[in-house]
Image (tube, grey):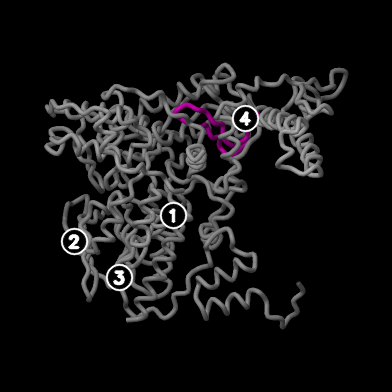
Amino acid sequence: MRRLVLALLLACAWGAAGPARAQAPSADGGEIYRQICQACHMQGGTGAIGAGRVPALAHNARLAVAAYPATIVAQGHGGMPWFSDILSPAQIASVVNYVRTHFGNHYQDALDAQTVEAMLGPKKVDDH
Amino acid sequence: MTTGQTAFTRRDMLRAIGLIAGAGAMYQAMTALGHAAESQFTGAPDLSGAPRGAKVVVLGAGLAGLLAAYELERAGYAVQVLEYQNRPGGRNWTLRGGDTYTELGGATQTVRFAPGNYLNPGPWRISHHHRAILHYCRAFNVRLEPFIQFNNNAFVHSTHAFGGRPQRYREVAADFHGNVASLLATAVNTGGLDHAVTQEDRERLLEALKGWGALDDSLAYRKGLPVSGHRGYARPPGAGADGAPLPSDLLPFHDVLDPVVWKSMTFFTSYDMQPTMFQPVGGMDMIGKAFASRLSHQITLNAKVTGIAQDENGVTVRWADTRSAEMHETKADWCVCTLPLSILSQIDIQVSAAKKAAISAVPYASHAKIGLEFRRRFWEEDEAIYGGISFTDQEIALVSYPNDNFHAAGPAVLLGAFALGRGGYDLAGMTPEERIEAALKQGEKIHPQYRKEFLSGASVAWSRVPWMLGCRARWSEADRAAHYQNLVSMEGRIVLAGDHASYMAGWQEGALLSSLDAIRQLHHRATAV
């Protein structure tokens, strides 16, 4: 019931023109990158600079420990939103694995959904 | 209540309470008297007694910064405004033909709309209960016109219902109400609600359901002229030999339960979205321009703030001229910082660890808007849609029709996408050309005239807006509890303002209320020195 109420609140949010239904979730890391991460981190993971900076993911030494990007994707960091509300642990693992093996990154240890699930904190909920 | 010439009016009383006990008490009193319950706006701030020569630096020339500059200047402070963009207004922004816009990543769009046509990439509607922004629109003679918002004749479209064909709002809404009313009436009549409703109220409820749902005497929701009086007709009433109306067919109940139906209905009745709503005639940026034109000093544009320091003597703001890369320092007694937290969290600012944590705790949503210009107003000419919004479960989320210049010949611009959440990210990750194609491909499922009539389009994906890196602040419940008070309280000589420092993120009203609160705090401290 609480879940239903929250869904309703989200639909009523600012400008939340509302009805948009979540797209069929992809399991493919590359596709998730294209559909979500690329909005800010840009094609090729180059990042960008304006009044502030969107960090580059290409050749990024901070990706060495998989838990770091996984935590940030799930919980957000600074201006970056949390994604645990629209990505499952399996999808977070998948996109982190993709970024850590593309854009000049060559980290071979892959994350799995169980590991991501175990490291997730309490789920963040928008307050409107 | 009758009041004679000498009577102590409610207004007198409120003024007295405001003078004695401050704005907060006045607001409480107003609420008790049945005024102002809808907005926390209590009128233009009273900043009398400003210390002579006190200087304030305002960072950011969005509505929060502009209001702060305007009111502080009026109160006698010396104000300098620093703005990153080459224009004031911030998200109070309108794109017109001839404008160019370069997003993060370098893609540049030149808007090709005909004169008079525009896209509001940011805020685009004002609620009747947003009294602060309405106050300044009135004070500055910013002309308003209705933002139509709710239109029974607009469409509801789902890829999962009605065979993918758009339906008129009035039809799905009537069928939703009718079916629900009939089911509930059946439950009442079969004793299903005997435990919850008294005999007297069961009868009253049945009467209400019958009228509300347009049920027949057997409490069924059936095709017929009474029902068509709500949902529309197969042949509407006319004149002459064939003047008699013919009833329309009902939609399958399974499809009527598609989420897009009830979410559309809920949207229009939500507090923030209820009519009456307004838009400035000619574009939302009329408000920012009205503020900016009333400042006595020019806003310093193209200024990228790189550091904000303070000590017991004052504030020092370091900034770079983005055209020359030359570094500058601005010193002031006080600072109103309205930079979005997505940017401020990356700037060296001399505040406590608690305030820094608050600044870093709030991310920004990704929304994307796309304006499409068409040769003619086919939605008016072919479909009798005059303003309002059609909703869809596709990424574009909606199609919103112009609320002005009905029946005008020549090109018109509609809002072809207002994508949120996943859809917002997906569209933001595309090139501007790909976004237009996505808007056409999804929109033509609602309006098949799209391809034939399309002229040009412009898009703003807020994740890629260089001075925002997002659209509006997203507060989580936990972060609000942990950080909100730390964010909004003045610290030393610095106070933050903006919609992110309110409970109305993404609304201009939130930016203005936050700014009013900030400058009251500032003034209180400045006059206490």
The image quadrant that residue B459 belongs to is top left
Residue beneath the point at 51% across and 33% down: A19
User: What x and y, as percent, mark residue A79?
Assistant: 29, 46
Q: Mark 2: which amino acid? A: His
* Stretch in magenta: B384-406
Chain holding disc 4: B
Tell me the residue that label 3 is attached to. Answer: B334
Same subunit: marks 1 and 2: yes
Q: Amino acid at mark 4?
A: Glu
Kind of residue indicated by mark 1: Gly
Determine the secondary structure under disc 4: helix
Q: Nearer the viewer, residue B510 or B291?
A: B510
- Kindly identify which residue carries mark 4: B380
Question: Quick one: label 3, few (<14), some, or many (20+) residues within 10 Å?
Answer: many
State how far apart marks 1 and 4 are (Cα).
31 Å
Chain of the residue displaying label 1: B
Q: Residue at (79%, 34%) from the top-left corner?
A: B210
Q: Which residue is mark 2?
A: B328
Look at the numbered discs 2 and 4 and tell me whether their residues touch, using CB distance below 8 Å.
no
Please report whichever mark, 1 or 2, sits nearer to the chain's N-terminal start: 1
Helix, strand or loop status at disc 3:
strand
Nearer-N-terminus badge (2/4): 2
Asked if one can make out residue B129 in the rendered structure from this viewpoint, the answer is: yes
